[in-house]
Amino acid sequence: MGSGESGADCEETVQRLYTYLDGELTDERRAEIKKHLDDCSPCLQAFDFEAELRIVIASKCKDHVPEHLIVRVREVIAEEERRSTG
């Protein structure tokens, strides 16, 4: 594992998997992550796991989520992103 020629290293790739899966990256960043996934089997395995997990969760979890929980999860995610970038 490493950065290789893609410009994205393993740690960054794994951290960006959710935004990659959600389509929330720029085209340039998506291309960098895709190149890294193509070249790095451990990161590709992590990607495959996360993608499969999303499918399972989507098919099994159809319950209504209380709005306060959604807000709290968003807050925690934003806090973690600030912590990891700051």
Image: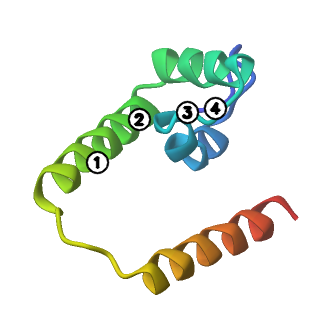
Displayed quadrant of residue 36: top right
Residue 57 location in percent, x, y?
Answer: 21, 56
- Contact (CB < 8 A) between labels 3 and 4? yes
Instruction: Identify residue type, mark 3.
Output: Met
Mark with earlier residue (3, 2): 3
Say the numbered circle drawn on residue 79: none
Residue 44 location in percent, x, y?
Answer: 40, 29
Residue holding disc 2: 42
Instruction: Identify residue type, mark 2.
Output: Pro
Residue 70 location in percent, x, y?
Answer: 47, 75
Q: Mark 1: give few (<14), some (14-19) or many (20+) Cα within 10 Å.
A: some
Say the numbered circle drawn on residue 54: 1
- Considering the numbered disc 1 on the image, is that residue within a helix, a strand or a loop? helix
- Contact (CB < 8 A) between labels 3 and 2? yes
Q: Mark 4: give few (<14), some (14-19) or many (20+) Cα within 10 Å.
A: few
Residue holding disc 3: 1
Residue holding disc 4: 2
